[in-house]
Amino acid sequence: MDTAIKIEGLSVAYTNEDTLTDLSLTVKKGEFVYIIGPNGGGKTTLIKAILGILTPHSGEIKILSKKHNIGKRKIGYVPQKSETERDFPITVLEVVETAFLKSQLNPFRLFKADEKQKAMEYLTLLGVENLAKAQIGTLSGGELQRVLIARALARNPEILILDEPCANTDPPSSKKIHEILDEQNRMGVTVIVVSHDINHVLQSKNRTVFINKQILFDDIADERVLRL
Amino acid sequence: MLDAVFKYQFLQNALAIGLLSALICGIMGVIITEKKLLMLSGGIAHTAYGGVGLGYLIGIQPIIGALIFSTASAVVIGKINRTKRVQSDVVIALLWSAGMALGITFTGLMPGYPPDMNSYLFGNILSVSHSDILVLAVLSFITLSVYIIFQNDWKAYLFDTAFAEISGINTAVLEYTLLILVALCVVALIKAVGIILCLALLSAPAASAALFSKTLKGRIILSVILTLIFNLTGLTLSYYFGIASGATIVLVAILTYFILLFVTKGKCK
């Protein structure tokens, strides 16, 4: 199986203190991987290093066997809700449309009718098409998360990375999100989810990587998972 | 006052500055408040004081010195923001104080009596020249053009910087452009309301507009209109009561914001 993400000897530091130390991880194409671990253990740092938002001070990351800055264009990313500007005056449809901006800078870029239609299709897939004209700040946690997933899918990604997608969402939203992720994975998309929902992770039977500055274990069958 | 406007060149100049600063404040104020960059803008504004002092000391236009200092501080803050190695608010606070300290030091080094720096600190819209109007017109044109040309990039960047970055949008260029525009905006406002009071003119109209409009475009248009109203009202009051124009404009803006906040109960209709 081809490699989706290959990380070797990765170390990332915030203000001179290592958050990740000499971490290596390989994710194959089409895999569904959960990343779990304690708060401050480096889960989000790992995601941000993969996305190129944080620069590692050592180590190498390859995405789809390409250099990091080229490969990352194939990633669809769903951040934690707190990382978006929720008070920003923008509609749901406009948020999804931003996924179609693919150049470094997009002067005089207006969205075409087919792009608007495509954005609506992704909103429909996530069951939030009725919110297209709503301001992003008026949405509930679950609704916002679905919109952010629709935006990630609109990039037609080969790899989908989600940071706590079900945090503070109601059970129906959470169920819908898991269904969508499973469906995308069945369609061949590599899915990586940072999660605190240990019960769901255990039920899913997917590969689970436990991180606390390093990878402590990388197997759902590891007896230490059962003690979490 | 209308008679006086037709009669006196300085009042015509003041009106031109009021109109152009409304345009630049309306756009930048909304972006700055939405991106929560007000304190950063304050830091950039106050470093401009060092440039004013240097301008006097070496005999160049103080406003050129302010432009150099504020642009340089914008670049330094942007660089530090991106490296994430140091808390940016620490650097902002240090540059803020350093700018003021340098301004005082430079003017202190001048032979003879130090120049009156009050018009740079608190503004004096009635003392503007044709060249000030020209500078502000160019800065307003640059700001308006940069916003309109890249408006969808701005939307993506302002709503979710991380997503914009991994989408391939050059967020570094947008971030530095935004900070440099903040620096230009601050310099543009020095003549109208001064270094110390410009934060109010960047925040009050934008925050007032946010109480009435839910869209970015609506907030910008409303903010431009409100800034113009604040400028004209402040100018008129200062003319009739013989009080400082910059302070009057700022007080009108702040008072209006709190009245609107009270009337709307802080919620956008």
Image (cartoon, coloured by chain):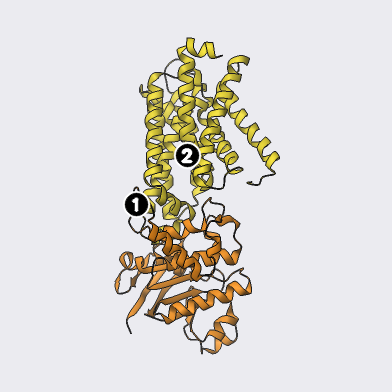
Chain colours: A orange, B yellow
As displayed, is residue B223 above or below residue B5?
A: below
- Which of B95/A192 is in front? A192
Q: Extreme left residue here? A: A66
Q: Does residue A195 show up? A: no
Badge 1: residue crowd in 10 Å (few <14, some 14–19, many ≥20)? some
Where is residue A209? Give x, y as percent: 48, 80
Q: Quadrant of the C terminus of chain A?
A: bottom right
Report the chain holding disc 2.
B
Q: Mark 1 points at which residue?
A: A106
- Which of B133/A219 is in front? B133
Where is residue B150? Give x, y as percent: 38, 47
Where is residue A19? Give x, y as percent: 48, 67
Q: What residue type is labelled 2?
A: Ile
As displayed, is residue A102 above or below residue B147?
A: below
Q: Which amino acid does label 1 sit on?
A: Asn
Q: Are marks 1 and 2 in contact (CB under 8 Å)?
A: no
Q: Mark 2 points at which residue?
A: B27
